[in-house]
Amino acid sequence: MKKIVVLTGAGVSKESGLDTFRDANGIWAKYNMEDVCTPEGFRRNPQKLHEFYNKLRQDLPNVHPNAAHIALAELGNAIERKQIEAQLTLITQNIDDLHERAGSKHPIHMHGDLYQLWCCGCDAKLEWHQACFIDTPCPSCGQNKLRPDIVWFGEMPYDMDKIQTALLSCDIFVSIGTSGVVYPAAGFVQMASSAHAKTIELNLEISAGTSLFNESFLGPATQLVPQFVEKLLKGEI
Ligand code: APR
C-alpha cells in the first residue's frame, strides 16, 4: 500500500483565476496581511476584515477547478476504485473549494474554509456563502460575534495531529504550488523526509524549500499535476 501525501498552495488555483499571495500582483501586494490575516487586525477593524473575505467569497463561484484539481480528484477516485493500491491524504493551505468542486473528497483545509464562519460567542461552525458583517447575528446564539473560520497568522492550523501522522508514515510527499515560506506547511517536506518518503515539488518557480526535495519540477500546475498523476497510475513513481 503506497501512502501518498499531497500538499497544495495558492499556485494550484492560480490558473483557475485566483490570485496567489506572494506573486508580483498577489494578494499581499494589494492588502496588508496584518489587517486581514491576524487576530489583531480583526480586533482593530473587524469590518475591513469581513469586507476582505466577503470579496473572496463573492468571487469564488465565478472561478472553476483546473486540470490540476481535476487530476488530483481522479487520483483519489482511482484509489477508491482500487486501480492502484494506495492511500491519499490531500492537505491544502487554500481556503477555496476548488478541490471539492473537482471531486476530491475530504481535503484537509489546514488554514480553514472560506465557506465557513465561526461564532466566537457560542463556538458554532456555520456553512456560510453570503456576505457577513460585524452586526450579522449568529443563527445559533443571536450574538454579533461571527468571524471567518480561517486560520490567521499566529493561530494553530487545523488537523495537525492527522497531518503529522500522515507525513510520518508516508511513502511519497508531493508539494504543489506553494512558496514554502509559511510554517508549519513549509516544514512538511522535512517531516516526510524523516520518514524516508520520496519528496517531490511541482511549482512554477524555485521555492524557499526546493533544495529540501528529492525532485523538483518547474512549470504550471495544470501541466505538471496531470503528468504526475499519470506516472503514479502507471506505477512509474
Ligand atoms: N502552477 C504552479 N505553481 C504556481 C503557479 C502555477 N500556475 N502560479 C504560481 N505558482 C507558485 C508560485 O511560484 C509560488 O511559489 O505558487 C506559489 C504561491 O506561493 P504563495 O503566494 O506564497 O502561496 P502559498 O504558498 O499557498 O502561501 C501559503 O501563506 O498567506 C498565507 O495563509 C496564506 O495559505 C497561505 C500561505
Image: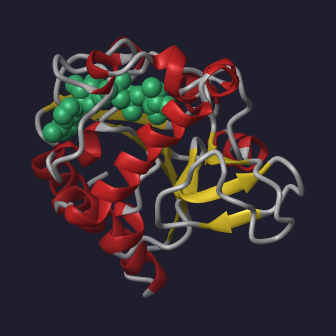
Q: Nearer the viewer, residue 57 or 85?
A: 57
Residue that appears at 73% across and 41% down: 160
* Residue 174 quadrant: top left
Work out which residue is located at the far front of the displayed protein and give it.
135
Give the quarter the ligand 1 occupies. Answer: top left
Q: Is residue 61 above or below residue 39?
A: below
Residue 20 horizontal side relative to residue 139, left or right: left
Q: Is residue 169 above or below residue 209?
A: below
Residue that appears at 21% across and 60% down: 63
Quadrant in which the N terminus is drawn: bottom right
* Residue 37 quadrant: top right
Work out which residue is located at the far bottom of the displayed protein and give it.
81
Residue that appears at 58% across and 41% down: 111
Asked whether the viewer can see residue 234, the reply is: no
Residue 24 horizontal side relative to residue 208, left or right: left
Residue 209 horizontal side relative to residue 224, left or right: right
